[in-house]
Image (cartoon, grey):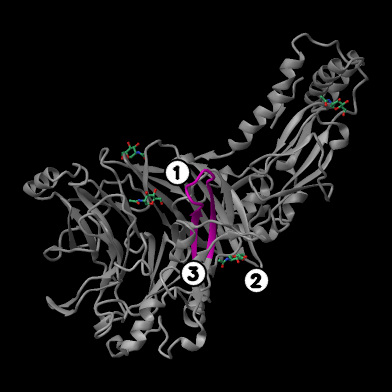
């Protein structure tokens, strides 16, 4: 039997559909661990933190280090004595080097940098061009971590803080053995004088933060938001489980007078619900990365999630609306645990004071002790924030960094999959009404084997990938990977050229010029021009119709594909037609979960022109041999005519066409 080899080959072909990326440009100054990237579109700079260096690169070509206006290398050498002492106390030479941990661009164009020098973090203001210190670096605790690999976060907030003083908010771990997990705001300083003391969350109370892993922080309006996962206190009596959270604090929070002194009084948090809905929802509870996208009426947080690191790993992408988050914090029910051993319950609304926890007040030091006592134990919302149906979910992989680019009111999502060294590219958009749609556009394989530390995006232009040895630059568009019209049309960076049957980077002219299919609205025209989707095979052949969308379904001649032994849907959403017969000829469509056609194939099983053979093996061999020749020759009718005259019956079975050979002959 020749089935198993075919199946094996298809499986390989099915998962091997990633397209290899080629960098447009590369920057390297040696293997010095390029750990941190910051894009500043305004100054066309890409800032790169590496061991003992900060580089400023030209964002349109990171390889162009020819002129001082495009390139700066700022060395960050620590004091040799301090470095030696750092190593003597048991830290690795790598950790005792100088590292850029945080970098922010201020509105005046200056840079704010937190660096670890021999594990003694310093904060400095740098000139954006020369990267020289603008003033004397200050040693600082609780803003950036001296350690690699801790999952910390920080956001620079220039406006809206008490007395309008700029500051950083961090989600961090401190203490000798890093036992304190907290959200922190350093003292607010004006003219070298401390105006307001530092602020933090309570780190001795697991209700506040319970071994959190921070993944992101953002400021919007009068609030600062933190995204993290932590051990779920509300689940504690049933075992150890991590939940993902969003927390919110008011920028103008000054803490309480007696109760919650120097502690954020406005701290509230809620669970993020990224799950596949069903009678028993399947939850992705470990947030890995988050990215903020502003739109006209709302702000969205796109986040990647994975399941608990148990035997079964799966990952998903969900998105959360800021309006939903705020509505929950402003109007939702609180939850509480009446005693340490009891289950968590919803707090009856009538017990919530008028001065509700989570609201910004003009001066929190005037809030009554009773209200602050209530706030101290009521900071977890009873309900979760809905993340919608996952935009994509995959088995056996862990998603990590997520980046989102807004193009023509569509959101292009890039998700990094470390174990496969791949970047998934998706498009997600809202149609008129509340209809949300998404298409998995492509899977891009990164070319270098080194561990990746950071990925950044210059909207509509480039992705930057920093690894141990280099920073590489890739166009976001990558239109040439699209071999089918529909996917090209759905990709907001691309348009399809009908005459050439190829996908090109979109230019404004394409939407008015003839001969182009520039966007998803005109994607219906894709099916009327079937260049990329005509598949021709012969009886007995197998073929893979690709779709690259896991939640896809297939139709044949507009009817759902029934279950047939010789039609197999692959793990990556493709359809394998095995042992094709003439009856399999027709139009196959791959539909996304909401019914949008992604791919269309017109399959022709050409069995019409052959004489009947005598045995099954002969049938296959003869069919192929003859039909393939036929196909080649019929390009030129006259040639074919002459050939046909000489061979008016099918040739004898050639010896090399044995059953074993046939099994490898898959048309893809
Ligand atoms: C970078 O630039 C140098 C010369 O300017 C050139 O030789 C090299 O090929 C470039 N490398 C890449 C990856 O673009
Ligand atoms: C940080 O998060 C990653 C995954 O998101 C995890 O593998 C790693 O262990 C975390 N680091 C620490 C120090 O817990
Ligand atoms: C999460 O969302 C799903 C689907 O909308 C819903 O069925 C489930 O009850 C929600 N779970 C929680 C804990 O809110
Ligand atoms: C392949 O299909 C033909 C006709 O459709 C059938 O006669 C034959 O048994 C099939 N072969 C196998 C191995 O199933």
357 over 211 or under it: above or below = below
Q: Looking at the magenta stretch, what is its main secondary structure? A: strand
Q: Residues within 10 Å of mark 2 (few under 14, many from 20)?
A: few
Q: Quadrant of ligand 3?
A: bottom right
Residue 187 disc label = none
Q: Is residue 327 left or right of residue 75?
A: right
Residue reaching furthest to the left: 81
Front-lying residue, 58 or 426: 426
Q: Nearer the viewer, mark 2 or mark 3?
A: 3
Secondary element under disc 2, as helix, strand or loop, is: loop
Residue 17 position in % (x across, y down): 59, 38
According to the image, label 2 marks what residue?
Answer: 434
Q: Quadrant of residue 380?
A: bottom left
Q: Quadrant of residue 219?
A: bottom left
Of labels 2 and 1, earlier in sequence is: 1
165 over 571 or under it: above or below = below
According to the image, label 1 marks what residue?
Answer: 418
Of labels 2 and 3, earlier in sequence is: 3
* Residue 307 colored in magenta in the image: yes
According to the image, label 3 marks what residue?
Answer: 343
Residue 30 position in % (x across, y down): 26, 38
Residue 37 position in % (x across, y down): 33, 53
Q: Is residue 353 left or right of residue 616?
A: left
Residue reaching furthest to the top: 655
Q: Quadrant of the C terminus?
A: top right
Q: Which residues are magenta?
A: 300-319
Residue 584 position in % (x across, y down): 84, 37
Q: Nearer the viewer, mark 3 or mark 1?
A: 3
Q: Quadrant of the N terminus?
A: top right
């Amino acid at each position: 039997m020749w089935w198993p080899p075919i199946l094996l080959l298809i499986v390989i072909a099915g998962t091997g559909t990633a397209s290899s990326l080629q960098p447009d440009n590369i920057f390297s100054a040696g293997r010095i661990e390029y750990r941190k990237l910051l894009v500043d579109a305004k100054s066309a700079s890409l800032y790169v933190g590496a061991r003992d260096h900060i580089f400023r690169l030209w964002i349109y070509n990171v390889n162009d280090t020819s002129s001082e206006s495009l390139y700066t290398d700022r060395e960050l050498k620590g004091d040799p004595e301090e470095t030696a002492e750092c190593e003597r106390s048991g830290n690795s030479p790598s950790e005792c080097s100088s590292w850029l941990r945080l970098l922010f661009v201020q509105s005046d164009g200056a840079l704010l940098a937190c660096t670890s020098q021999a594990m003694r973090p310093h904060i400095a203001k740098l000139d954006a061009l020369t990267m020289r210190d603008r003033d004397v670096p200050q040693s600082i605790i609780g803003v950036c971590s001296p350690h690699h690999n801790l999952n910390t976060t920080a956001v620079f907030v220039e406006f809206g803080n008490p007395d309008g003083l700029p500051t950083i908010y961090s989600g961090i771990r401190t203490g000798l053995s890093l036992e304190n997990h907290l959200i922190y705001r350093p003292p607010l300083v004006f003219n070298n004088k401390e105006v307001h003391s530092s602020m933090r969350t309570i780190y001795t109370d697991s209700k506040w933060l319970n071994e959190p892993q921070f993944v992101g922080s953002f400021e919007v309006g009068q609030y600062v938001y933190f995204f993290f996962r932590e051990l779920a206190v509300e689940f504690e009596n049933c075992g150890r489980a991590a939940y993902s959270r969003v927390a919110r604090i008011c920028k103008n929070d000054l803490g309480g007078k007696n109760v919650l002194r120097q502690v954020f009084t406005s701290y509230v948090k809620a669970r993020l619900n990224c799950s596949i809905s069903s009678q028993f929802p399947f939850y992705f509870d470990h947030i890995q990365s988050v990215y903020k996208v502003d739109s006209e009426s709302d702000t969205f947080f796109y986040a990647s999630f994975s399941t608990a690191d148990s035997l079964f790993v799966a990952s998903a992408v969900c998105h959360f609306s800021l309006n939903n988050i705020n509505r929950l914090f402003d109007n939702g029910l609180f939850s509480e645990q009446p005693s340490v051993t009891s289950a968590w319950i919803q707090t009856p609304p009538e017990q919530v004071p008028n001065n509700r926890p989570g609201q910004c007040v003009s001066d929190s030091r005037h809030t009554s002790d009773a209200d602050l006592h209530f706030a101290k134990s009521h900071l977890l919302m009873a309900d979760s924030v809905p993340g919608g149906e996952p935009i994509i979910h995959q088995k056996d992989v862990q998603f990590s960094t997520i980046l989102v680019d807004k193009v023509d009111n569509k959101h292009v999502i890039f998700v990094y999959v470390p174990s496969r060294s791949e970047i998934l590219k998706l498009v997600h958009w809202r149609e008129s009404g509340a209809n949300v749609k998404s298409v998995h556009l492509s899977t891009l394989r990164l070319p270098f084997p080194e561990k990746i530390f950071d990925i950044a995006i210059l909207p509509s232009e480039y992705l930057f990938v920093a690894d141990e040895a280099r920073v590489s630059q890739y166009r976001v568009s990558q239109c040439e990977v699209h071999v089918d019209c529909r996917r090209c049309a759905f990709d907001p960076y691309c348009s399809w050229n009908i005459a050439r049957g190829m996908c090109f980077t979109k230019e404004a002219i394409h939407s008015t010029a003839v001969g182009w299919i520039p966007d998803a609205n005109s994607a219906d025209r894709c099916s009327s021009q079937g260049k990329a989707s005509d598949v021709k095979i012969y009886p007995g052949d197998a073929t893979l119709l690709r779709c690259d969308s896991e939640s896809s379904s297939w139709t044949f001649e507009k009817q759902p594909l029934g279950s047939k032994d010789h039609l197999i849907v692959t793990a990556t959403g493709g359809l394998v037609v095995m042992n094709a017969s003439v009856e399999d000829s027709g139009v196959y469509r791959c539909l996304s979960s909401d019914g949008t056609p992604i791919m269309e194939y017109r399959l022709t099983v050409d069995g019409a022109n052959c004489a009947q053979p005598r045995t099954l093996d002969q049938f296959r061999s003869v069919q192929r041999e003859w039909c393939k020749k036929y196909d080649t020759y019929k390009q030129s009718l006259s040639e074919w005519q002459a050939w046909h005259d000489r061979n008016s019956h099918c040739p004898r079975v050639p010896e090399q066409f044995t059953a074993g050979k046939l099994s490898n002959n898959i048309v893809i």
